[in-house]
Image (tube, coloured by chain):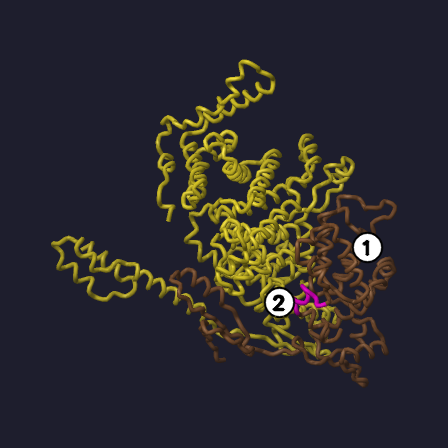
C-alpha cells in the first residue's frame, strides 16, 4: 500500500539538514500591517503583540526544515483529502520526527507553525490534537495543557457537529479511532489528576475552582452521544442486521451517516461510551449502549485492531462485574486468540505495545474468571495464562487464602476507575474536610465489591474437591470430613449450586440478554440428607489437533501457491549446468521440498 | 414465588426490560433523556410505585443512581435506601453491588442539615444483610433482620416495601429448589422464617408437598435439581468461507470452538455451516 512509497519529506530525514528553507510564506508573515505601523503609534498592546510575534518568529526559526516540510506536506494531504498520504504522515512521519526531534520536548506550538499552513484553522485544530496527544504520552501535561487540550477537543467536535452540514474532511480510520480514544483517555487522566488535592499549587486550586465544566462527565458524554446521534450509527447497525440494502441504509442514515468520517466516529463513540460508563462503574449501562453492536470479528465494522481490543476488554470486564463469568471468558478467549493470530501483522504498529499490555491484563482477568467459574476452556489461552499467572491461579483456586491473589490481579487488570465529580474545589471549607477525610479511591471501592463476591464463593473449591470423590454421601459425613457444622455446610452447598449457574448469552442479540446455564462439570443435589453427585467428563478432544493440522496444511498450500513456478527459474540458472538443473526439479517434492531442491541446485 | 416469577428471574431479557415497565420509563431508560436531571422525579415516583406493588425494575433504579452520581445536589437518601432494599432480594443476581457501584463518595454534606443523612448508618447493615443472603445463610439473615440493630431499617423502610419478607423468602426458595429434591421441614422453616401452619400454607402455595409423617418436603423436579452424568463432546462448527485470507478464517475457526453437552439437542444449522462432530465412544 501507500506505506511502501516514500514521501518527499521522509527522504530528507536522514540527509544533512543544512539546506536552506525556501518557504516564502514566512517572509510575509509578521510584516503585514502591524509591523509597518509600529513606528507611528506604538502602545503597550502592540508592543506586547510585536514581542509575541518576534518570539514566535524565533521559535519558528528553530524548527528543523524537515519538520517544516513535513507539516506543509501533511497540510496539503489534509486539504486534498488524500487518505493514503495522510495515513503515511500520521502513522509514520509524525512518529519518526517525534523520535528524531521531539522525544523529550513538545512539538512547535500551533501558533508558531500557523504560517506554514496559511493559518488553516481546521488543520491547526488537528495539529493540536496530535500536539497534546504527544504531550500526554511522552511528557507530563501541566494544568494549561489539560485545559487547552479540552478546549481543542471541543473546537474539533464543534466543527464536526455544528458546521452547516457534514464537513468535507476525510481522515484515516485509525486516526478517527485515536481521536475518540485519546479524548476519553485525557478525560480519565484529568479526573485522576483532579482527585489528588494535596499536590495542587495555589494557582491550580484557583483555576480548578472556576473551571468545573472543564472535562466534566456531562460534557464528555455529550460529545459521544452527539456523534452517535448525528451519524445515526445505531439505526445503521440495526439496518445492517436486518439485511437492508446499501441504498436503503443510505436513506436511513442521511447525509452525515453516509460519510465514512461520521459513520466511524459514531461507531467509535459507542465503544467510547462503553468505556466511559465502565470507568464510572455503571457496568449495566456500559453493556446497554452496546446493544446494537454485534460482537464478532466475522463482519467487522472497522478494521482498527485497537478498537476491537478495547471493545472486548471492557465488555469482558463488565461481564465480570455482572457475575457473568462464562460470557466474560468467551469475550476474552475470542479477542486473545484474535490478538495471537494478528501478532505477526502488527509488530510494527505503533500501538503494538498498548495492545500487548491490554492483552496481558485480559489474561489476568481470564485467570480470575476461570478461578471463579472453573470450566474447560480454550487450550491455547489457558496455557498462556498458566505461564503468566500460574502462581496466582493456583492460589485463587484455593478459596479464602487466595483472596490476596484475586486482589493483586484485579487491581492490575481493572480499568482506571474515576469519580464522576471533582473534589469541592469551589468551597475551601469542604475542600479542607475532603483532604482531612480522604474518600476511598474508586478502584478500591470496586475492588471491595468484587472481593465480597469472591468471599461469598470462598468455600466452594474445598467442597468441590471432596464431592469429586463420591457419587453419593451423607451430609453429616461430609460435614465431618470438612470439620464443619452440618447446617453451615448445607448452606455452603447452596452457595456452590448458585455459583455453578450463571446467566449467559446463548444466541440473544443484546449483550445484556441471556439465559441461565450450568457452568460446572460437577453437579449435585441433596435428597433430604443424602448428597448425590454427578460429574460430566470430557471425551477425548480431537478438534485442536485437527485444526492445527488443517492450518498447517493451509500454510503449506499457500506457500506452494506463492512460490514461483520452477520452470521460470530455468533461464536465470547458469546455462552450463542446464542439464543438471532440470533433474532436481522434476521429482515432485512434498511440502516445502521445493525450496530445498533449489538450495541444493545452487550448492551443487 | 410461582413458576412465572422464577422464570422471570432466569431470563436476563426480562431483567433488563421487565414487562411491567411503562413506555415513558422505557424511553427514559433507553434514551438520552435519562441524563436530564429534571426527569429524576418521574423515576423516583416509579420507584415508589415498585415499592407499593411488588414490581421490580433494576435498570430504572440504576438510572436514578446515575442521575445522583452526576448531580450530587439531587441526592435523596430515602430513595437510595429503597433502591438498595429492592436490590437486596434479587440475590444471587448482582443488583445490589451494581447499585453500590454507582454510589460515589459523597463530597457535599446532606442537603438538609437539620435531618442527618441516614444512609451512612444504614449502608453497613444493608451490606451485611446482602452478604448473608448472598451466602445463603438464611437463618442468620432472619436473626439479624429481626434484631434491634435493624429496627430503624425495619420501621422506616422495609415496612413500607410491600412483600419485602416474601421477597426474601423467594431468595431462599430459589436456592433451595436448585439444591434439593427434598428437605426437612424444620430446616426449610428456618430458611423461610416460618413455623408450623404458616410453613404448611407457604409450602402448599409453592406446589411442594409435605409428608406429614416424616416431616420432609419434596420439591418438584426442575432444571437445577435434576443431575445427570454426561460425556461432554466437542462440537465444532466450521463456517465455510470463500475468503482467501487464511489468517482471518483461522481466527474464526478457533473462536467458534466450544463444548456442548452430549444430551443437548442441536439447533438447526444454516446451510452454510458444516458441522463436524467428533464423537467419543466411552
Q: Name the residue under label 1.
A: B78
Task: Please identify the residue farthest to the bottom as the structure is shown.
Answer: B213
Q: The brown chain is which one?
A: B
Residue B271 in the image: state x and y as whole percent.
Answer: 46, 74
Quadrant of the drawing holding the C terminus of chain A: bottom left
> Which chain is yellow in the rendering?
A
| Left or right, residue B214 beside residue A70 | right
In the drawing, what numbered circle is on residue A514?
Answer: 2
Numbered range of the magenta stretch: B11-19
Marks 1 & 2 on one chain? no
Label 2: element kind: loop
Q: How far apart are marks 1 and 2 (CA)?
A: 32 Å
Count neighbours of disc 2 (C-alpha within 10 A) and say few if under 14, some if 14 to 19, many if 20 or more: many
Can you give x and y, in whole percent of width and height, for residue A136 in the image?
55, 39
Q: Name the residue located 77 percent from the left edge and 60 percent from the top edge.
A: B46
- Rate crowding at label 1 as few (under 14), some (14 to 19) or many (20 or more) other CA atoms within 10 Å: some
Q: Does the magenta stretch include residue B240?
A: no
Q: Mark 1 lies on which chain?
A: B
Identify the residue shown where x is 83% and y is 49%.
B117
Amino acid at each position: 500500500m501507500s506505506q511502501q512509497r516514500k514521501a518527499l519529506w521522509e527522504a530528507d530525514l536522514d540527509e544533512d539538514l543544512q539546506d536552506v528553507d525556501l518557504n516564502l510564506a514566512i517572509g510575509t508573515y509578521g510584516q503585514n500591517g502591524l509591523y509597518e505601523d509600529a513606528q507611528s503609534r506604538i502602545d503597550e498592546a502592540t508592543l506586547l503583540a510585536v514581542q509575541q510575534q518576534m518570539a514566535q518568529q524565533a521559535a519558528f526559526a528553530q524548527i528543523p526544515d524537515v519538520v517544516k516540510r513535513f507539516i506543509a506536506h501533511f497540510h496539503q494531504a489534509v486539504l486534498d483529502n488524500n487518505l493514503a498520504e495522510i495515513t503515511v504522515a500520521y502513522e509514520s512521519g509524525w512518529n519518526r520526527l517525534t523520535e528524531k526531534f521531539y522525544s523529550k520536548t513538545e512539538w512547535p506550538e500551533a501558533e508558531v507553525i500557523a504560517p506554514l499552513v496559511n493559518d488553516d484553522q481546521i488543520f491547526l485544530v488537528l495539529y493540536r490534537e496530535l500536539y497534546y496527544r504527544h504531550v500526554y504520552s511522552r511528557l507530563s501535561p501541566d494544568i494549561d495543557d489539560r485545559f487547552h487540550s479540552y478546549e481543542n477537543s471541543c473546537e474539533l467536535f464543534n466543527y464536526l457537529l455544528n458546521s452547516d452540514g457534514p464537513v468535507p474532511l476525510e481522515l484515516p480510520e485509525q486516526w478517527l479511532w485515536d481521536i475518540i480514544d485519546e479524548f476519553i483517555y485525557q478525560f480519565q487522566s484529568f479526573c485522576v489528576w483532579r482527585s489528588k488535592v494535596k499536590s495542587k499549587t495555589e494557582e491550580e486550586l484557583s483555576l480548578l475552582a472556576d473551571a468545573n465544566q472543564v472535562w466534566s462527565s456531562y460534557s464528555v458524554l455529550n460529545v459521544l452521544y452527539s456523534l452517535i446521534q448525528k451519524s445515526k450509527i445505531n439505526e445503521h447497525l440495526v439496518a445492517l442486521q436486518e439485511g437492508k440494502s446499501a441504498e436503503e441504509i443510505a436513506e436511513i442514515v442521511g447525509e452525515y451517516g453516509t460519510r465514512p468520517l461520521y459513520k466511524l466516529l459514531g461507531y467509535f463513540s459507542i465503544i467510547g461510551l462503553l468505556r466511559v460508563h465502565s470507568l464510572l462503574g455503571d457496568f449495566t449501562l456500559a453493556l446497554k449502549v452496546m446493544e446494537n453492536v454485534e460482537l464478532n470479528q466475522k463482519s467487522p465494522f472497522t478494521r482498527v485492531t485497537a478498537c476491537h481490543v478495547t471493545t472486548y476488554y471492557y465488555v469482558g470486564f463488565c461481564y465480570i462485574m455482572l457475575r457473568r463469568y462464562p460470557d466474560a471468558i468467551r469475550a476474552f478467549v475470542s479477542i486473545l486468540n484474535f490478538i495471537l493470530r494478528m501478532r505477526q501483522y502488527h509488530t510494527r504498529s505503533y500501538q503494538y505495545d498498548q495492545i500487548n499490555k491490554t492483552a496481558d491484563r485480559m489474561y489476568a482477568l481470564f485467570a480470575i474468571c476461570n478461578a471463579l467459574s472453573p470450566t474447560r476452556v480454550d487450550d491455547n489461552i489457558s496455557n498462556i495464562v498458566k505461564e503468566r499467572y500460574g502462581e496466582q491461579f493456583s492460589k485463587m483456586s484455593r478459596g479464602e487464602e487466595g483472596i490476596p491473589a484475586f486482589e493483586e490481579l484485579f487491581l492490575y487488570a481493572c480499568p482506571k476507575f474515576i469519580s464522576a465529580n471533582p473534589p469541592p474545589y469551589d468551597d475551601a471549607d469542604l475542600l479542607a474536610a475532603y483532604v482531612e477525610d480522604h474518600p476511598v479511591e474508586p478502584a478500591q471501592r470496586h475492588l471491595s465489591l468484587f472481593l465480597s463476591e469472591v468471599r461469598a464463593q470462598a468455600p466452594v473449591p474445598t467442597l468441590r474437591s471432596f464431592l469429586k470423590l463420591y457419587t453419593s454421601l451423607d451430609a453429616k459425613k461430609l460435614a465431618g470430613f470438612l470439620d464443619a457444622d452440618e447446617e453451615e455446610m448445607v448452606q455452603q452447598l447452596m452457595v456452590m449450586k448458585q455459583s455453578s449457574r450463571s446467566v449467559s448469552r446463548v444466541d440473544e442479540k443484546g449483550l445484556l440478554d441471556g439465559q441461565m446455564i450450568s457452568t460446572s462439570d460437577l453437579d449435585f443435589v441433596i435428597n433430604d440428607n443424602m448428597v448425590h453427585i454427578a460429574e460430566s467428563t470430557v471425551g477425548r478432544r480431537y478438534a485442536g489437533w485437527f485444526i492445527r493440522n488443517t492450518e498447517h496444511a493451509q500454510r503449506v498450500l499457500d506457500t506452494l501457491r506463492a512460490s514461483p513456478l520452477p520452470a521460470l527459474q530455468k533461464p536465470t540458472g547458469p546455462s552450463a549446468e542446464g542439464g543438471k538443473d532440470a533433474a532436481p526439479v522434476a521429482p515432485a517434492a512434498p511440502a516445502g521440498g521445493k525450496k530445498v531442491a533449489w538450495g541444493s541446485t545452487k550448492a551443487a | 414465588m410461582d413458576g412465572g416469577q422464577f422464570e422471570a428471574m432466569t431470563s436476563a431479557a426480562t431483567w433488563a426490560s421487565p414487562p411491567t415497565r411503562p413506555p415513558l420509563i422505557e424511553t427514559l431508560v433507553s434514551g438520552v433523556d435519562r441524563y436530564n436531571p429534571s426527569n429524576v422525579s418521574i423515576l423516583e415516583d416509579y420507584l415508589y410505585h415498585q415499592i407499593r406493588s411488588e414490581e421490580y425494575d433494576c435498570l430504572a433504579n440504576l438510572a436514578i443512581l446515575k442521575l445522583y452520581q452526576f448531580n450530587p445536589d439531587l441526592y435523596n437518601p430515602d430513595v437510595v435506601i429503597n433502591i438498595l432494599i429492592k436490590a437486596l432480594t434479587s440475590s444471587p443476581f448482582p443488583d445490589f453491588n451494581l447499585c453500590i457501584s454507582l454510589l460515589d463518595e459523597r463530597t457535599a454534606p446532606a442537603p438538609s442539615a437539620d435531618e442527618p443523612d441516614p444512609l451512612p448508618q444504614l449502608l453497613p447493615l444493608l451490606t451485611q444483610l446482602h452478604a448473608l443472603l448472598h451466602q445463603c445463610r438464611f437463618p442468620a439473615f432472619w436473626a439479624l433482620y429481626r434484631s434491634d440493630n435493624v429496627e430503624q431499617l425495619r420501621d422506616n423502610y422495609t415496612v413500607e416495601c410491600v412483600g419485602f419478607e416474601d421477597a426474601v423468602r423467594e431468595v431462599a426458595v430459589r436456592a433451595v429448589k436448585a439444591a434439593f429434591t427434598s428437605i426437612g421441614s424444620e430446616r426449610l422453616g428456618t430458611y423461610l422464617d416460618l413455623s408450623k401452619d404458616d410453613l404448611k400454607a407457604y409450602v402448599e402455595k409453592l406446589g411442594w408437598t409435605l409428608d406429614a409423617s416424616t416431616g420432609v418436603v419434596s420439591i418438584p423436579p426442575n432444571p437445577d435439581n435434576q443431575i445427570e452424568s454426561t460425556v461432554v463432546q466437542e462440537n465444532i462448527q466450521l463456517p465455510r468461507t470463500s475468503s482467501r485470507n487464511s489468517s482471518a478464517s483461522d481466527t474464526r475457526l478457533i473462536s467458534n470452538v466450544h463444548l456442548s453437552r452430549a444430551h443437548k439437542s442441536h439447533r438447526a444449522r444454516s446451510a452454510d455451516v458444516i458441522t463436524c462432530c467428533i464423537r467419543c465412544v466411552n
